[in-house]
Image (cartoon, grey):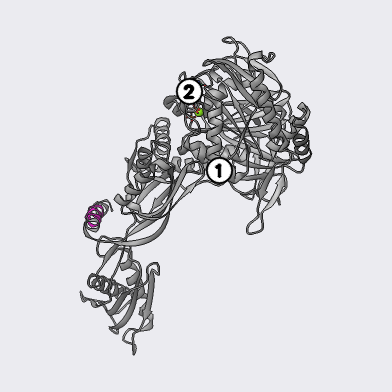
Amino acid sequence: MDFTTAQLRNVAIAGHGQTGKTTFMEQLLLTGGVISKAESTASGKTVSDSAPEEIERKISVYASLSHITWKDKNINFWDTPGSADFTGEVISAFRSSEIASLLIDGRNGVQIETVKLWRDLDRRNKSRMVFINRGEEDRTDDAVIAKDIHDKFNVEVCRVTIPMKKSGKWEGVIDVLNGKAYPVPAAGAKETATDIPADYKEDYETALSNLAGAAAEGDDDLLIKFIDEGELTPDEISKGLKEAFKNNRIIPSFVGAPTLNSGLVPYLDFIADIAPSPEDAIETAKKGDEDTVTVKVGDGPMTALVVKTASDQFSGKLSYIKIITGSFAPETEYWNITEGRKEKIGKIFRSIGKKLEEIKVAYAGDIIIATKLPLAKTSDTLAAAQDAIPFVRLRHPYPIYSMAVSADNKKDEDKMSELLAHAAEEDRTLSYKFNPETKQNVLSGMGELHITILLDKLKNQNKLQINTTIPRIAYRETIQRKAQAEYTHKKQSGGHGQYGRVVLAIEPLERGENYKFTNAVFGGAISKGYIPGVEKGVKEAMLNGVLAGYPVVDVATTVLDGKEHPVDSSELAFKIASRNAFRDAMRQAGPILLEPIMNITVWVESKYLGDIMSDFSGRRGRILGQSDIEGGIEEIRAQVPQSELLRYAIDLRSITSGTGSFETSFDHYDPISGKIADDVIAAAKEFITIQNLEE
Ligand SMILES: Nc1nc2c(ncn2[C@@H]2O[C@H](COP(=O)(O)OP(=O)(O)OP(=O)(O)O)[C@@H](O)[C@H]2O)c(=O)[nH]1
Ligand SMILES: [Mg+2]
């Protein structure tokens, strides 16, 4: 079936880990008639959590896309993972959806990942609705959650459904907007509408009046009418809610008991009737350094954005594509604007989790899947016209947790590198790089779970043993004072000899100035032609310092004097002489080690503030500042040596029971001394010995 842009809805279901998103999605699919039985994550047979790593761990790892046809609308739902380790998946879902639907566990209220998602949605100015689940449980009270939301985000929710729950017994929900009740259906039966029971009339009247108040936010005329008359007609309420929701001025809230199949019909009705279609939604595009331009979702030549790529065991490479303008056809060639090359499109599909349903055309605003696209990567723009402006790329955070990885032999190591490089292309929150200084392959991601799941998957699929260690740190060496040294390189072993004598002085530069080389030889003691050899020698010496073999930085070298031989001198002889002169000078110049210092920003609930501060002091950290941000969250900014942060993703998780998060970036190098430096030097010596044996 074809759906026009106005008939589409794109909803990203998101929220704190284990709040019940996948279970909720399953019940929505059942309600929408897509599946005939709702499975639980315990059974490992849910539509959304179909990957082996999801089934094994009973958590979502990937954003899963399914669609439901409801009231002639095609609703695309993303079920996203709640763990911060898989935040890249949520980014794909948010970027391609006009609506975010936050699932809140009725027993626990707004939890920290939800607070972080909310902040992200604020930055995107994205419309959001909330669904409070586990309504049947004693502890769940949607009024308490409404207050929690108010306290954390300073917004009022407008309750579109309210619970029918007296003396702790869950009886169903009332759809305030449509003035109907939905009693809990019998096991296996569908939810159907009835009149509102007399017991709940009063609750309903109050909620309706509040809903009219929220609808009045949508339109000035409605607001005036509401103020004058104190009420609005049902049509006016619908119209006002549509406008207010589309413009992100209200937060509609729903309550239900998904596993009892209760509260889902009014939620789907609201999405179909009130929530915005992608029509007129705004995308941003940008060519090179030119200004950003805005593009309205709708008619025009075909343009689209690749929002996610994945590999499927059976279907191969999958590209998830949000169509921005025009219509998207299968068996076509489009331009991949990002690559500057033509992309051959084969079949196109909608999906129910991993099940693909072939379609013949799709229109602006839809999210579809194309298989086996040769070039497409996440953030690529596809277009009918070669000169289309590329859409702004998806913004992914920097990876915060790194492991050095290796395999047992060269063949496996090559295979490992190929697989990891491919994984990093698919998942933009991963990075895989060879660090030439430490001679290690480093895999970085959003947390221990992220890395572990990826490596387990590769091991299982490819029968590959991958070893992990904590990565080495890229230390540096420098000097503390001026020194001078001379060195004569002389070899007279018959035939052509080698001769070069170099006198040079070194002195410290400002931190970050790195390198300076001056030739101050007077009166031609060393001919001009040999000076490049002298400089090469200095550069070579600076590759491996005298303390622990780390690169030497922030040193100025001046060549003062030297001597050459008419026959035996050569560039090579001067290079060897100056390399040794530099090393001798460095030994006298108070060599010290430098370590990388990182900027770190941590977000935690206020109650952990003290623990975070004292933990930083144990890590030789320096606090730069701290501020309260919305949602009862503290932001702490500090500088901490990189060597103290290697396991921070794990440690922060244990300090904050999994609720904290952080970002880091390199800032500068600082000297280290005493035992810390001794340990680094001892470890490096061991490393150098092994390296030498290997070479
Ligand atoms: N009683 C009850 N249990 C639920 C409900 N929703 C989820 N659960 C249980 O809560 C656990 C987590 O449910 P999931 O649906 O996997 O939660 P999720 O939010 O998708 O988890 P992540 O994707 O890992 O963030 C499972 O054991 C579910 O059976 C509910 O409405 N009622
Ligand atoms: Mg899930």
Residue 120's tag is 1
The front one of 382 and 528 is 382
Instruction: Provide residue 171's location: percent of width, then percent of height.
Output: 58, 14
Magenta segment's dominant SS is helix
Within the image, what quadrant is residue 231 found in?
Answer: top right
Q: Secondary structure at mark 1?
A: helix
**N-terminal of the two: label 1 or label 2?**
1
Residue 216's tag is none
Residue where numbered disc 2 is placed: 139
The front one of 186 and 287 is 186
Instruction: Provide residue 108's location: percent of width, then percent of height.
Output: 47, 29
What are the residue bounds of the magenta stretch?
A: 679-689
In the image, residue 301 above or below residue 504: above
Instruction: Provide residue 27's location: percent of width, then percent of height.
Output: 57, 20
User: Label 1 sits on what residue type?
Assistant: Asp
The front one of 130 and 187 is 130
- Is residue 115 visible to us here? yes
Within the image, what quadrant is residue 30 found in?
Answer: top right
- Is residue 117 visible to us here? no
Instruction: Provide residue 376's location: percent of width, then percent of height.
Output: 59, 42
Instruction: Give the left or right position of residue 341, taking residue 424 as reference.
Output: right
Binning the other alpha carbons within 10 Å of mark 2 as few (below 14), some (14 to 19) or many (20 upward) gives few
Within the image, what quadrant is residue 368 found in?
Answer: top right
In the image, residue 133 above or below residue 529: above
How many numbered tags mark residues here? 2
Quarter the N terminus occupies: top right
Residue 684 magenta-highlighted: yes
Mark 2 CB within 8 Å of ligand 1: no
Q: Secondary structure at mark 2?
A: loop
User: Label 2 sits on what residue type?
Assistant: Arg
